[in-house]
Amino acid sequence: MKKILVRSAFTTLVVLLFNCSNSEDSNNISSVNTTRPTPPITALEEVQIGTQIWSTKNLNVTKYSDGTPITQVSDPFAWRNLTTGAWCYVGNNQSNDMTYGKLYNWYAVAGIYDAASAANPALRKRLAPRGWHIPTDTEWSYLINTLDPNAMGGDDFNTAGFQMKSTGVISMGTGLWQYYPGSQGTNSSGFTGLPACYINQFGTTYDPGQAAVWWGSTENNNTEAWVRSVMYTGGAAARVFYDKKYGCSVRCLRN
């Protein structure tokens, strides 16, 4: 009986020492490795439109999908000189964060985080959470044409914007969009487009309320990429290109 008790005590001591050792190792790893993968988009934040499944919120992350930090830049002079990924708060106001998500330049969309990844696309990161991606220009056009089958190639002559806008207007105290006669959104698509506006290539910020602009992953040329924009003054989802230094919202599309 005595031998059994001694053996049990010895086993308990070994287990305690092992657990303490693991705890110290875990603490050391946590203090060194601060990167963590971004959380997935939940089923409560997605909607099916046609054959596509879209996120219903603007992206709101500060890291690429592998946990690599994305630089926050609030200084307009620094923003205009960027050639790597960055984000900022809507209107450079942190209080807008939970409502509108963040604004990203196109370099963040492309996963360009340093000089090496700018030169070599194989080294680039993923901005979207795993299982999702940033929509191409063609995928955006599919969305627009699904919402308005009579649209001419998803260009300015469509009514998709009405169906994409969140409901309510600022002046009536029931929503986020600035009021304009006859231009209220219905959100019949469930897309819930929010007017986060943007930051331009010179680092000038604009308060939310007048426009929703989302990046696509498709380039127009070396300095510009395609976006979709919806204005408070109308109901079209316009296909235009912006300078890659712009800061715009991002929506994700399920793989």
Image: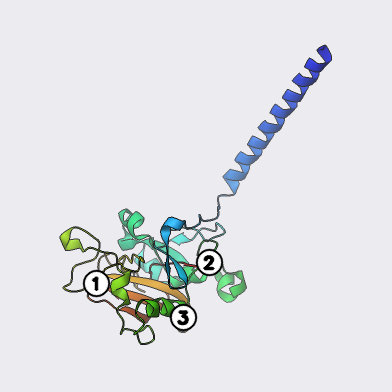
Tell me the CA gap for discs 3 and 2.
25 Å
Asked if disc 2 and disc 1 are in contact, CB closer than 8 Å, the reply is: no
Q: Say whether residue 16 is left or right of residue 107.
A: right
| Crowd around label 1: few <14 · some 14–19 · many ≥20 (10 Å) | many
Residue 211 in picture, x, y percent from top left = 28, 71
Q: Secondary structure at mark 1?
A: loop
Note whether residue 104 is visible.
yes
Residue 138 tag number: 3
Discs 3/2, front: 3
Amino acid of disc 2? Tyr
Say above or below: 93 vs 83.
above
Residue named by callout 2: 113
For badge 1, the amino acid type reads: Tyr
Q: Name the N-terminal-most of marks 2 and 1.
A: 2
Measuring 26% from the left and 76% from the top, which residue is drawn there? 235
Residue at image point 42% right, 58% down: 45
What is the secondary structure assignment of the residue under circle 3? Answer: helix
Q: Position of residue 215 (x, y in %)?
A: 42, 73
Which residue appears at 82% of the width and 12% of the height? 1
Q: Is residue 161 above or below residue 87?
A: below
